Amino acid sequence: MKASRLVAGAFTAAALASAASRPAAAAQASTAAPSLTKPAKFLFAAVPKPDAGSVSAPIGRYWNGCMSGAVHMPGAGPSWQTVRPDANREWGTPFLLSYLRRISAKAQAAGVWRGIIIGDMSQPRGGPLPSSHVSHQVGLEADVWFRPMPDHVMTHAERDTIYSTVMTLPSGLDVDPKTFTQDVVDFIRISADDPAVDRMFVNPAIKKALCRVAKGAPWMTKVRPYWGHRSHYHVRLVCPPGAKSCVPQEAMPPGDGCDKSLNWWFTPAVLHPKPNPKAKPRPPLTLAGMPAACRAELTKP
Ligand SMILES: [Zn+2]
């Protein structure tokens, strides 16, 4: 989700978005005390590698945290490929990597897709991203594209330039029946119907379409409407068992989300929000406002 589209409320920080801007320069973690007042996104984006030898753990909140002992998702596996290799965001907790391997293998075995395309995960030490993402900070979230992986291992150039498929009509009022096909529904179901999933964000038009074919399904509770997400879903996993520094999000409201509350997303003011010139931009996250363990994370070799 884009920061500029955030609406009031505590939950709004819990978000996502696409976009990928390459960190300007990569540097080793420094043993000098990192700045507490600079935007933390620049500090985290500048560290090219995870901390060596640390136990893998998510630290803090999905939208204010970091990660120790990150593991790397290989660019190509039996049922997945990753994209935008230069962005250095294919890092996560083992819990996230297991999830992505599991659901991609399931989709493949079910004959839904030959494999999946994984977009942004987290940076090598987690933390805020330099683009418009708000969450993706603790190694428990990923963007997965609504497009099967190609029938060959993509070259570096292909991974850099491929795009996903848009599922919605330009009006935003509904899905495009030419692209939103049964395999997409099946893939979302396989992805959401996994006990590791806390919630998943899709465009409101996609949620509306899912309500037509899967109303009442228990996994629908986890599939939430949000701005953007026309060509990928954002999945957020629960805190893994034993992850003491991981702060869970409040529980999802009960129900399948196919009630009247969905109509709000299709009102003109929400579909086409006007910029508010009086709105003050949210101050950037700094280390001073982050868990103390994330400060330490930046100074580890
Ligand atoms: Zn995302």
Image (cartoon, grey):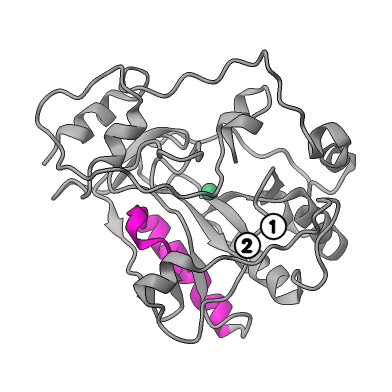
Q: What residue type is labelled 1?
A: Trp
Dot 2 falls on a residue whose secondary structure is loop
Would you say the beta carbon of the disc 1 residue lies within 8 angstroms of ligand 1? no
Q: Residue 301 carries which label?
A: none
Location of the C terminus (image quadrant): top left
Say which residue appears at 39% left-offset and 42% top-offset. Answer: 138
- Can residue 188 be seen by looking at this rendering? yes
x and y percent of residue 241 in the render? Answer: 40, 48
Dot 1 falls on a residue whose secondary structure is helix
Q: What residue type is labelled 2?
A: Asp
Tag 2 near tag 1, CB within 8 Å: yes
Q: How crowded is mark 1: few (under 14 residues within 10 Å), some or many (20 or more)?
A: many
Q: How far apart are marks 2 and 1 (CA)?
A: 5 Å
Residue 29 picture quarter: top left
Q: Which of marks 2 and 1 is nearer the N terminus?
A: 2
Say which residue appears at 76% left-offset and 69% top-offset. Answer: 180
Which residue is tagged 2? 193
Which residue is tagged 1? 219
Q: In this view, does 104 lie above or below 40?
A: below
For the stretch drawn in magenta, the main secondary structure is helix
Q: Residues within 10 Å of mark 2 (few under 14, many from 20)?
A: some
Region of the chain picked out in magenta, as a range: 83-109
